């Protein structure tokens, strides 16, 4: 079994191709071919989590073993640490081991890219990213690779990380605006076509007022007690999720807003539907083993 490090794993998972691979797996899920049980979550010390996530498409099977410790940011350690093992479904032969943190970052951002390509009233233009960590960078890369961006605004509580992310954006030829005040953030939220919330905040960070055609991908909050989006925004938006069952269990943004689940739509059901012509549109993802399966399927091709 070959074991790939972080850079080797990333090289096999280019964002536009990974978004296509995710679309394929969503269609396989709809046909009952690709499936995964609910992930097993075990609480750990210091508010950490141990997660076990298997999945299969009948030809290959994968399992991801991951830990998530939000306190690691202060310790200068990775918040997510993980491995993805890929095996032959017929024989169990181990074929590949991928760097799980890299898979998590890239498949999460690629899923947001697929959602934006499918659901954003204006799938391009100005991008606002809240959060300058791993997911902030991954979404910058994914959206600039897969959409026609005209500029990016950045907001984060960590000035050093924000400036580093600004340098990455500038290196991609994007005009960059680093936001320093709440007023600047409010203004950027109303002017942006695309907004990504990628923080581990327990309370809302996205302004309540956003542009009428805004698409918001909320990926940072992964527990019922966490929420990056204000309830008023959720209640007036068209709401889509990666999976209904995952969102009902873990999406604090929606749970705390008391969302009417009858109007929440899974991404797979929206793939062939007309694109929304107005917003705001919220896409909330909490993660699923099938997204890791999609990454494994693509990595094997490479």
Image (tube, rainbow, N blue to C red):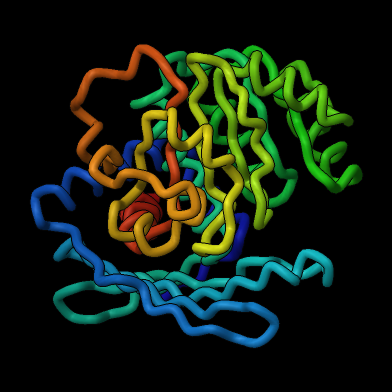
Nearest the viewer among 176 and 298 is: 176
Position of 97 with respect to 30 (left or right) is right
Q: Residue at x 62, y 78 (%)?
A: 48
Can the viewer see residue 197 in this picture? yes
Residue 228, compared with residue 217, is above or below; it is below
Position of 148 with respect to 7 (left or right) is left
Quarter of the figure with the N terminus? bottom left
Residue 164, compared with residue 191, is above or below; it is below
Residue 116, compared with residue 25, is above or below; it is above
The number of numbered badges drawn on the structure is: 0
Q: Residue at x 58, y 51 (%)?
A: 227
Q: Name the image quarter holding residue 143.
A: top right
Pinpoint residue 258: horizontal percent, then vertical percent. Answer: 42, 49
Q: Residue at x 33, y 18 (%)?
A: 276
Pinpoint residue 42: horizontal percent, then vertical percent. Answer: 48, 84
Residue 59, compared with residue 184, is above or below; it is below
Nearest the viewer among 276 and 256 is: 256
Nearest the viewer among 234 and 185 is: 234
Position of 133 with respect to 267 (left or right) is right
Pinpoint residue 106: horizontal percent, then vertical percent. Answer: 52, 49
């Amino acid at each position: 079994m070959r074991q790939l490090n972080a850079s080797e794993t990333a090289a096999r998972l280019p964002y536009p191709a990974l978004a296509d691979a995710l679309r394929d797996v969503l269609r396989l899920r709809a046909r009952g071919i690709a499936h995964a049980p609910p992930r097993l979550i075990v609480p750990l010390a210091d508010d950490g989590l141990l997660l076990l996530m298997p999945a299969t498409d009948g030809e290959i099977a994968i399992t991801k073993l991951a830990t998530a410790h939000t306190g690691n940011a202060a310790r200068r350690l990775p918040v997510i640490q993980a491995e993805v093992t890929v095996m032959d479904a017929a024989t169990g032969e181990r074929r590949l081991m991928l760097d799980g943190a890299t898979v998590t970052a890239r498949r999460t951002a690629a899923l947001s890219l697929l959602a934006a390509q499918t659901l954003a009233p204006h799938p391009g233009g100005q991008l606002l990213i809240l959060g300058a960590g791993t997911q902030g960078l991954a979404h910058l890369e994914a959206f600039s690779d897969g959409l026609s961006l005209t500029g990016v605004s950045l907001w984060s509580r960590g000035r050093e990380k924000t400036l580093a992310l600004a340098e990455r954006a500038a290196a991609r030829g994007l005009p960059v605006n680093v936001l320093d005040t709440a007023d600047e953030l409010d203004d950027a939220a109303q002017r942006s076509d695309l907004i990504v919330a990628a923080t581990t905040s327990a309370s809302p960070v996205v302004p309540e007022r956003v542009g009428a055609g805004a698409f918001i991908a909320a990926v940072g909050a992964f527990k019922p007690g966490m929420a990056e989006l204000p309830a008023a925004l959720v209640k007036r938006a068209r709401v889509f999720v990666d999976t209904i069952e995952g969102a009902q269990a873990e999406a604090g943004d929606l749970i705390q807003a008391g969302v009417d689940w009858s109007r929440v739509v899974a991404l797979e059901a929206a793939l062939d539907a007309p694109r929304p012509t107005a917003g705001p549109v919220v896409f909330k993802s909490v993660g699923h083993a099938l997204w890791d399966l999609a990454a494994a399927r693509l990595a094997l091709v490479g």
